[in-house]
Image: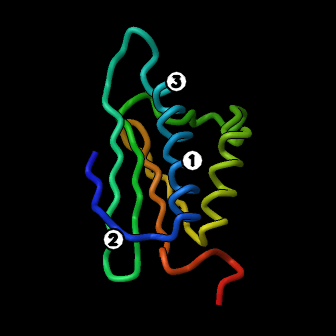
Amino acid sequence: MNVQNAQIPVETEISLGMVVNKLVTNAVKHAYPLPQRGEISVRFKMNDANATLQVGDSGAGLPDNPGMQTSGLGTKLVSALIQQIGGHLTTRRHPGITYIIEFSPQNNGPGSP
């Protein structure tokens, strides 16, 4: 973990906590099929009014087969939570996968002024 201290609204903290929980749980379940072992990284940093959260691993990654389901309930939940905080999700594939969530902590979501 590499996490910078920051002051963000509690509603955003709750959403981010749920996103991290889901992404880390998915990595634990799918990134390293037994008997493989590996690391899962969580990084958070703030610059001025923008914040970036990254959750990643160097495991199996997502399937390239378009017929495989990669849009299940967990993915929909993560997308909804990111939308709720007015964030943007980028997925970077490499050995493994990294989810990059960028958002403005001062923004309380899509309906904010």
Spatial CA span between label 1 and label 3: 16 Å
Across and down, in percent, residue 57 comes to 37, 37
Give the residue type at disc 1. Met
Tell me the residue that label 2 is attached to.
46
Spatial CA span between label 2 and label 3: 29 Å
Closer to the chain start, of discs 1 and 3, is 1
Q: Which mark is residue 29?
A: 3
Give the residue type at disc 2. Met
Q: Are marks 2 and 1 in contact (CB under 8 Å)?
A: no
Tell me the residue that label 1 is attached to.
18
Residue 45 location, quadrant: bottom left
- Kind of element beneath mark 2: strand
Residue 81 drawn above or below residue 73: below
Pointer 1: residues within 10 angstroms few (<14), some, or many (20+)?
some
Across and down, in percent, residue 5 comes to 29, 63
93 relative position to 47: left or right: right
Pointer 2: residues within 10 angstroms few (<14), some, or many (20+)?
some
